[in-house]
Image (spheres, grey):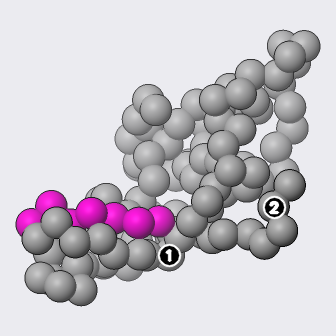
Amino acid sequence: MCLACNPLCGGCKPPRMTTVLCLRCKTYGIFDIEISENPTRKSCRTCGFDVTELAVPPIVHCESSGMLCANPCGFRSKAPEDGVPVECKNITHPLADRPSTPR
């Protein structure tokens, strides 16, 4: 168990922030995770390149709950020992227009 929650971690609950590597200038930026149909445009602070697509986490199939999650935590790859899906209180239901990505 952690002593303090790191908003970038995502180990036990969905992360609130994400790091993004700019494809143009190769610098890292930290952005708040926003799950919405039209996320706020995010751009590199160094060169201004649009990194909105990179800052939105991919939709994955959670092995723990058996559902799709738009902002997965570390339990996404841990199947329950008894094979019965676990109810997730932190699941972020995906929006219909976002494509899912296997992870």
81 or 68, which lies in front? 81
18 or 84, which lies in front? 18
- Badge 2 density bin: few <14, some 14–19, many ≥20, Cα 10 Å: few
Residue depicted at 44% across the width and 29% down the height: 102
The residue labelled by disc 1 is 32
Q: How many marks?
A: 2
Nearer to us of marks 1 and 2 is: 2
25 or 52, which lies in front? 25
Dividing the picture into quadrants, the one containing residue 67 is: top right
- Label 1: which secondary element: strand
Q: Which disc is residue 2 wearing?
A: 2
Query: In the rendered structure, which segment of residues is drawn in magenta?
Result: 18-24
* Residue 37 on image: x %, y %: 44, 64
Q: Is residue 92 visible?
A: no
Furthest residue in direction top, as rendered:
83
- Label 2: which secondary element: loop
Does the residue at mark 1 contact the one at mark 2 (Cβ under 8 Å)?
A: no
Work out whether 69 lies above or below 1: above
Residue depicted at 83% across the width and 68% down the height: 3
